[in-house]
Amino acid sequence: MTLPTAKLGRTGLRASRLGYGAMELRGPQAWGRPVSDDEARTVLNTVLDSGVNLIDTSPDYGDAEEHIGRWISHRRDEFILSSKCGCPLAAASDPRMFPPHVYTRANVRACVEQSLRRMRTDHLDILMVHMSPSVAVMRAEETIAEMRALQDEGVIRFTGMSGELPNLPEHIATGAFDVFLLPYSALDRSHEELVGAAAAAGAGTIARGSVARPLTAPPEAMPEPMRRPLADRHARLAAAGLDDLADGASTMELLLRFILSHRDLDSVIVGSAQVAHVRANVAAARKGPLPAEVYDALRDRLGTG
């Protein structure tokens, strides 16, 4: 049984509805746990062997790009590869710090060149602007102009935005981005209408930060702006008591299939450094959307977030 796929907006790319987020391969330099070469190799190849064909990463994700290049670059034609720009090229000395992102033409190009070297490829399928800067900032720094130049050179195929409120509506309105990576889950529906707006504009839509993170308390080393909302969602999930809705399924499966029930979402990225988790996610994704009554009950139980 294969994974379901969807057309990623106007790109024409056919993406598996379950994608893989490489943040969990970041390692200790980016407030993650150490991941051995053997773990990274096994997980990444299991992802592809399972039919997942969308991999999302970033220069911000510590060791992740190096692992992708080392262990699956020889399988490059099997997956859609998305990375980010605007990221600082040097890691912060303190993993709890959140260094400022820079959206100049020079830094956009430098990010891409570094990513290509690390991942041992000659192109990115999608280059996303990271951390949702305003349109005014991107115009002043000529961020989008540089992305267009990289497109013309064949270094990237499509443009994207890893966006969120308050700037996401103006990102969509520009028409400059082919794909949007945006927060959406049963515990955070604050961007629900914007998923539909991005899809209506012809862009591909991918959900992020959606499933695994609320299952456990976030690490103390995580930057506080990210840690605080995740801690809140973890507490809300623990208090919700979803066992009566699960019918034997895991909470992880419920949350994943909730996202797959959104008609305007093309894919959802979920990360893990454990093969068992990858396989469980794939099995859940193969089941598709939740039954309508379970979906509605879950919406009511968890609120809008």
Image: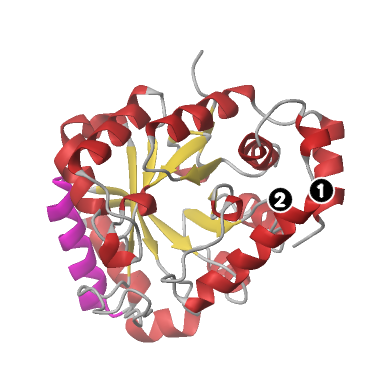
| Residue 210: % across, % down | 58, 51
Quadrant of image for the C terminus:
bottom right
Three-letter code, disc 2: Ala
Q: Where is residue 136 in the image (x, y as percent from the top left)?
A: 47, 85
Residue 93, x across and y down, in percent? 23, 79
Mark 2: few/some/many CA within 10 Å (<14, 14-19, 20+): many
Residue drawn at point x = 23 percent, y = 66 percent: 111
Q: Which residue is rendered at x = 59% and y = 73% of the image? A: 228
Residue 288 visible, this angle: yes
Q: Which residue is drawn at 44% across and 75% down?
A: 223
Q: Can residue 158 be seen in this view?
A: no
**Closer-to-camera residue (29/162):** 29
Question: Mark 1: few, some, or many residues within 10 Å (few <14, many ≥20)?
Answer: some
Q: Is the magenta stretch mostly helix, strand or loop?
A: helix
> Residue at image x 81%, y 44%?
298
Q: Which amino acid does label 1 sit on?
A: Arg
Report helix, strand or loop for mark 2. Answer: loop
Answer whether labels 1 and 2 touch (C-beta < 8 Å).
yes
Q: Which of the two discs, 1 and 2, labels the residue nearer the N terminus?
A: 2
Residue 1 lies left or right of residue 39; in this view the side is right
Find disc 1 in the rendering and name its residue: 299
Residue named by callout 2: 186
Q: Give the range drawn in magenta.
A: 104-122
